[in-house]
Image (tube, rainbow, N blue to C red):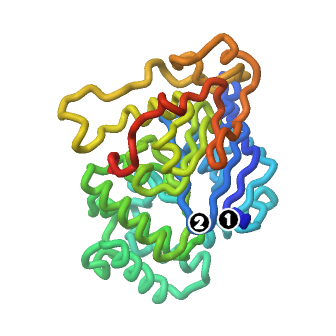
């Protein structure tokens, strides 16, 4: 049975005009996310992950141009919405958690005032009801003494508590779709695990659809249903999470997996894998495979022409002339990375 995707992105491209030229930050990206599922978009910094999420949210800078054949959320054509209508959808049906909550929260307003505004603005709720809901969601995300926290300012909270506040704020209007843009990167390891568990639990309980942005495949293995690997503004591999870890097809995906320490197998101080070289410039036309200069499998034909994201199994697609797979794939399972 064919399931209609809740998030449907087709041919998304984003260009950013600068004094030095045009940055082709996102190049013809397409993916879908089923209702209630989690898609992780993974890649190094500068690969285009975050700008893709901002394109979906309609939060691009004024110097950016967005194009897409299709950009739908629950059947709503986001490309057809004006700024006011998009702001209404963004607040009530979709929400975003950013990497650093201190730069997202207003330092001059209390936590309660910032959270209450979500409900009064998008639901027309009274101030009293909005503050009651704020206290409820703060308690729901595990913040102790929630009723007193609403009167505090962001600087009075730890980094972990501020990120929980951002999650609670996102939930005020109970959105159907959330984007989490590396929400654990700025936190220590123990707090990271708590936030990941919290997001997964809330998603299951509320039936939300989620896109999770990260550079860490170890995180992906814990929460994702499907994975989209991004490099040089393009998707280079897409697959269900189990298939990606069992049979990575693109050399870049394999390189990312090589960088993961495996508990119980990777000895303290042992050398982890690395990917030589640096990410490509996103200015100008792209010839051939963007990863070719860093790839051990690259041949002359990899450096010219246009490569498409091509299915090579029922569930897996790869943008590569020489997919590795088979006997060369890594013997890394999702359980080993947890």
Q: Nearer the viewer, residue 148 or 323?
A: 323
Q: Secondary structure at mark 1?
A: loop
Q: Nearer the viewer, residue 193 or 311?
A: 311
Q: Which is more foreground, mark 2 or mark 1? A: 1
Instruction: Name the residue tied to disc 2.
Output: 177
Q: Is residue 113 above or below residue 188?
A: below
In which quadrant of the rendered view does residue 231 lie? top right
Q: Secondary structure at mark 2?
A: strand
Residue at figure coordinates x 67%, y 50% from the top left: 31
Q: Residue furthest top?
A: 300
Residue at figure coordinates x 49%, y 55% from the top left: 224
User: Could you say which disc has been placed on residue 6 in the image?
Assistant: 1
Q: Quarter of the image containing the N terminus?
A: bottom right
Q: Is residue 223 above or below residue 248?
A: below
How many numbered marks are there? 2
Give the x, y percent position of residue 36.
Answer: 57, 68
The answer to whether any part of residue 198 appears in the image is yes
Q: Is residue 245 above or below residue 300?
A: below
Upstream in sequence: badge 2 or badge 1? 1
Give the x, y percent position of residue 310.
Answer: 71, 37
Q: Is residue 279 left or right of residue 333?
A: right
Q: Residue furthest left?
A: 268
Residue at figure coordinates x 78%, y 53% from the top left: 70
User: Could you say which disc has been placed on residue 160 in the image?
Assistant: none
Give the x, y percent position of residue 165.
Answer: 38, 67
Dots 2, 1 in contact, CB < 8 A: yes
């Amino acid at each position: 049975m064919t399931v209609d995707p809740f998030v449907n992105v087709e041919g998304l491209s984003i260009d950013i005009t600068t004094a030095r030229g045009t940055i082709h930050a996102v190049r013809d990206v397409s993916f879908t996310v089923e209702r209630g599922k989690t898609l992780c978009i993974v890649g190094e910094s500068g690969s285009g992950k975050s700008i893709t999420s901002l394109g979906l949210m309609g939060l691009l800078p004024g110097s950016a141009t967005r194009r897409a054949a299709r950009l739908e959320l629950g059947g709503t054509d986001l490309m057809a919405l004006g700024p006011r209508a998009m702001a209404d959808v963004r607040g009530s049906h979709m929400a975003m958690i950013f990497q650093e909550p201190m730069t997202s929260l207003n330092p001059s307003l209390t936590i309660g005032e910032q959270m209450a505004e979500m409900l009064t603005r998008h639901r027309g709720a009274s101030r009293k009801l909005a503050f009651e809901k704020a206290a409820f969601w703060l308690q729901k995300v595990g913040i102790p003494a929630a009723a007193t926290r609403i009167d505090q300012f962001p600087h009075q909270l730890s980094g972990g508590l501020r990120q929980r506040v951002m999650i609670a704020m996102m939930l005020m209007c109970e959105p159907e779709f959330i984007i989490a843009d590396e929400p654990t990167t700025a936190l220590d390891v123990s707090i990271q695990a708590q936030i990941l568990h919290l997001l997964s639990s809330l998603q299951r309980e509320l039936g939300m659809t989620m896109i999770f942005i990260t550079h860490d495949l170890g995180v992906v293995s814990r929460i994702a249903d499907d994975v989209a690997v991004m490099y040089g503004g393009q998707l280079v591999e897409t697959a269900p999470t189990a298939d990606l870890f069992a049979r990575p097809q693109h050399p870049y995906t394999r390189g990312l997996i090589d960088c993961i320490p495996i508990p119980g197998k990777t000895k303290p101080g042992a050398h982890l894998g690395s990917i030589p070289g640096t990410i490509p410039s996103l200015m100008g036309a792209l010839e051939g495979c963007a990863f070719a200069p860093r790839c051990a499998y690259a041949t002359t034909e990899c450096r010219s022409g246009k490569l498409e994201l091509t299915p090579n199994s029922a569930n897996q697609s790869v943008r590569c002339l020489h997919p590795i797979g088979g006997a060369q794939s890594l013997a890394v399972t999702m359980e080993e990375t947890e």
